[in-house]
Amino acid sequence: MQETNVYFYITPIALIFIVLEIAACFVLKRNYIIFTEAIANFGTQLGNQTTNVLVMLGVYVVYGWLWENFRIWTIPVTWWSSILLLLGVDFVFYWVHRWGHEINILWAAHSPHHSAEEMNFFVALRASVTQRLCSFLFFWVLTIIGFTPAHIYTLVAIHLFIAFLHHTELIPKLWKPIEFLFTTPSHHRVHHGVNLQYLDKNYGEFLIIWDRMFGTFEEEQEKVAYGILDHPQTWNPIIINFHFYIVLWKYAVAAPFWWDKIRIWFMPAGWIPRGLEQKGKPSITAENQIKFRPQMFDKAKVYLVLQVILGIVLMIGIISNLYNWSTAEKWLGAGLLWWQIINWSGILERKSWLWISETLRNIVTSLLIISFFENYSNWFPAIITTALFCIVWTIIFFRLPTTNLKTVAE
């Protein structure tokens, strides 16, 4: 098994691209990145990274068993086999991605990514925990062919990074041969659109030719309105991850017929049980779309930027062996990270419970992190100083009703 999760190496590259996009938007004066949604997206990704350890373990155990016992060929790891595997991953992913839009329970796993209402590199980070787990239920066929589990896991990570690069409005349409063969930002903007003509189009992540072959291609023409038809109306990563599961559960409970209570989970996305109100698809455009823009606490931006940095530092300890944390410590760290990003949503939505939760979190986190390090004396001053700063800031600025509130400008 790999000593370090491959996503540990991809993360800093993604962060560099994010910084470059922020800088480009600032220089070009483009309003493509909204602070509140960017923080929510980043927090969702930090939490989801904790599942990669589980996914990696599952891949190496289950895929390893399949490879040892059922592979047809033994394919070496070379440049040419890597190209073949990338094409195989892309073909399998096209169908996984398409099913993720066409089957209710798979849409529940995939929809958190689409619930973002902007298009930038932060949106690429907004994936769900269940999608990470579900996607590897389908790549096993590549193991049977003869690709090793480590090779598959690595190429899927590279494929995911390729998909990351599509999430931007800064890049216009490209040279026609490129647009014909490869998935470009223009194609993927269409995929994220809720405009009626853009729904369920352009599933390809590396090659767009799969969409051209199987009838799911759509050209970018009308300005894209991003999001989903049933937005969760929150920045809370738990609700973002499980919003559509809850929707399906409510339909299942309300359905008059038992058979409909079961099949609602496996029917095409948009199917409504018999006896319930049938809803048509609204016509949403960039001009009439009303985006989720709640109020957040004043003085929150500086604090949240610091928390993003601290969250990255904590995530590194969870997905790598850089800090020499034990498995139990990584699990505890994952719990602390989820507590942290849930509290971010409380700040972004000015929740009354936030100041108590955030104060407790800073106390518990500082004590546990100190205990994780054998030579904690080197870390003690920095950890305690940071925790005290965060507690004081929280008590002063994040308590209702004395806190001044501001409306987040678009």
Image (cartoon, rainbow, N blue to C red):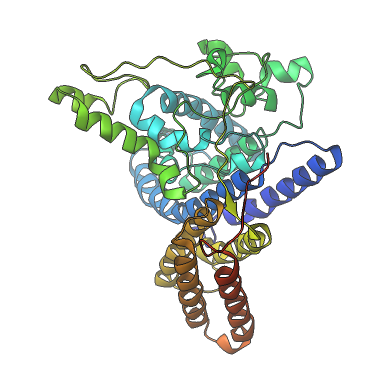
Q: Can I make out residue 321 in this image?
A: yes
**Residue shown at 52%/50% (left/top)?**
349
Above or below: residue 383 compared with residue 135: below
Outermost front residue: 402
Asked whether 358 or 218 is in front, the reply is: 358
- Above or below, 322 against 69 in this view is below
Q: Is residue 333 above or below residue 254?
A: below
Tag count: 0
Quarter of the image for residue 168 reads top right
- Of residues 302 and 102, the one nearer the viewer is 302
Query: In this view of the protein, can residue 139 be seen by the observer?
Result: no
- Closer-to-camera residue (8/255): 255
**Picture residue at 71% right of the left edge, 47% below the top:** 18
Residue 213 vertical position relative to residue 37 in the rendered view, above or below:
above
The residue nearer to you, when weighing 346 against 208, is 346
* Residue reaching furthest to the bottom: 377
**The quarter of the displayed image where residue 284 is located:** top right
Position in image of residue 328 (x %, y %): 39, 71
> Quick check: 328 left or right of 119?
left
Q: Which image quadrant: the C terminus?
A: top right
396 left or right, relative to 251: right
Of all residues shown, which one is farthest toward the right? 27
Residue 25: image x %, image y %?
Answer: 79, 40
Q: Where does residue 225 sit, x and y in percent of width and height?
A: 61, 24
